[in-house]
Amino acid sequence: MPSDKTRRGFLTIAGAGAASALAGCSGGPSSETTESNDGQTDSGSDGGDGGDGGDGGSDTEETTESVSNTLQMMATGSIQTLDPINAKGSGAGYDQYGRSLMEFNDGLYPPEPALAEDYSMSDDGLTYTFQLKQGVQFHDGQELTAEDIAYSYRRLAGSENSRNRDDIIGETMTIDHEKDASRTEPEDEETLSDYVPGSLAVEAVDDYTFRFTLASPFQYTLYQIAGGAFAVLPANSVGDIEGYDGEYTYNEFFSTENGGPTYAGLGPFQVDSWNKGSQIELTAFDDYYGEGPELDGITYTVVGSGNTRVSRFRNGNADVLEEMPTASFNPDNVSIEESMGNRSIGTYMFDDGTEVNYGEIPSLSTEYLVFNTLEVPLPVRRAFAYALNQHEVAQNVYKGNAKAGYHITPPAPYPTFEDGMSGEESYDRHAENGYQSNTEFGADGYPYGYGETRLDDARSVMEEAGYGENNRYSITATTIAGNSAYQSVFTRLQSKLRSAYIDMSIEEAEFGTIISRAISADMEVFALGDGMEYPGPQNFLRFLHGSNPSTQFTRWGAEGSNFTEEYRQIAREAWDSNYAAEGATQESRNEAFQTVEEMNWASVQELPTVHGTSQRFWYDYVDVEMYGVMENQTFDTVTKGQ
């Protein structure tokens, strides 16, 4: 998946080959962090004017003379955590050392059993039963049992270290559990903190039978549990939930305390050594239950600079490049030779004539601006929307390698209302002219200008709110350090917004820092992106209808936030009555999705910019497949030759 991309769940920042997952936040196809692994920074220009960037890097290493059987990969930023339930945009290499009950083989869906031999679902769609493969070993030699899965799910739901509770006890896939209103934050109507520890409806029926029961049917359950947040760990590894005292302290198991990490996963590779700021080394696990591994190991080196990543790849010091910085990518150098569904395979030729393999796929992702509604009033948010021209961003910033974004839901899974209509067609018709609109606000399509900038309207909305030359609004925008695309979007907006009485300064921060600050509501507006865990609009829209506002980056609907109660009530009613109600149909759900999208237009909580394209570049001596749309991929059968 694109680097620095969150999944509203679990994300891996090493790129699509190692990357995958998340239900929370992100970066994008052009993400480049400026801090390199030697602590130096570059200007963020990443090659400048559309060349291949090969001369712009700071890497002076000699070209590798021989090819070892260890795959050399790169991560764009510090590898923050090994704990799957704690990951929000970190965890390079997760798909190599972790494993969930289900998996997306080479990123293709539907999901397939990974740790399961077989599974079944009850007639009412609530209870899932899994027969586990026998003889599956953790990296510490213990055999996998159903209790390990029950423990791992309980940690996801109840641990104070979990940042992905919404994946298991949220408003989409919800495993049944008890709630205690006294545990809820006073200012919230309902939060995930009302979960009663130990009440999760998961059960180790016997050593090799695992079962859970949902509170209500959810069509993407098997997709959800294939995500990285659902990775299985040995029972009682750490004692951060009730009923388990822990064999190790948290930092012994997941970090470097007392000779750690003592982490034990189930993937084809095991963690050999780890340094958050520089590198994680994985070695082949000889007792892996599946096919392979064929490699001796995989090394992910943190290389923050986009230029340096390109330079390392071109010098042969990295075997695969996941995403080229937008400023360095030249679309004229691509030659597509084969299409495999929505995957395109071919070659990319650098300006010096060097040719490498190339793959691309439209990603199930959205790039957008996030507004902290505790700080930023609605007129300012709308002025941003009037000033933004998504078509111009797609063509000039992303060089045509992205689709202009007008909805939070990507085009492919966008709700449809006629037989035979594609999601993309429904997406475009709604944005252009309000096709199947459910509210007055969306009746004519995207209200801030489809493919245009409307600065007169931006000035008018600010003037109506009392702003003018003698009463200007100041705001700070935060972007991922070195991400030239995000920087360019803000820079273009900066000059336009000045004429609408908005003075915007731009600051940079590392991706992990941005996520931490977003959780703390410590920014006014920032650029981010999300990749889907499953191809359903609810994956993203569950965060935009005003429920549990204190847990969302936008804080829309929270006490003290700048929100319109009418809009919130329309969104809440659509969600509760059309999506979540008993007896809801796909037609009623699609209506709810469209309404929530229109209320995001009205409220401008998240302002979409583009839907990106994921890329991979690799040498002939690496036998690797281009990943599918879910982008998870395990390198268990990858080989290297001379």
Image: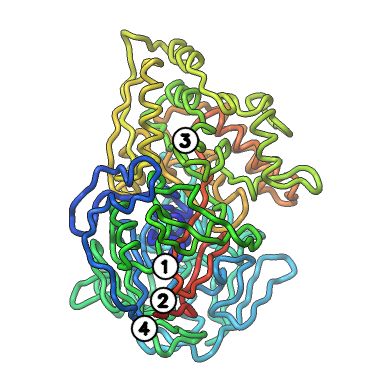
Q: Residues within 10 Å of mark 4 (few under 14, many from 20)?
A: some
Residue at image coords 43%, 81%: 268
Circles 1 and 2 in contact, beta carbons < 8 Å: yes
Q: Nearer the viewer, mark 1 or mark 2?
A: 2
Q: Marks 1/3: CA distance?
A: 45 Å
Which residue is identified by label 1? Answer: 155
Q: Earlier in the sequence, mark 4 or mark 3?
A: 4
Circles 1 and 3 in contact, beta carbons < 8 Å: no
Residue 233, which numbered label? 2
Residue at image coords 32%, 38%: 478
Who is closer to the viewer here, 572 or 357? Answer: 357
Q: Nearer the viewer, mark 1 or mark 3?
A: 3
How many numbered marks does the figure carry? Answer: 4
Q: Position of residue 612 (x, y in %)?
A: 51, 47
Residue 396, which numbered label? 3
Q: Marks 4/3: CA distance?
A: 42 Å
Q: Nearer the viewer, mark 4 or mark 1?
A: 4
Q: Earlier in the sequence, mark 1 or mark 2?
A: 1
Task: Specify whether 627 is left or right of 432.
Answer: left
Residue at image coords 56%, 68%: 104
Q: Amino acid at mark 4?
A: Asp
Q: Marks 4/1: CA distance?
A: 32 Å
Q: Secondary structure at mark 3?
A: helix
Q: Nearer the viewer, mark 4 or mark 3?
A: 3
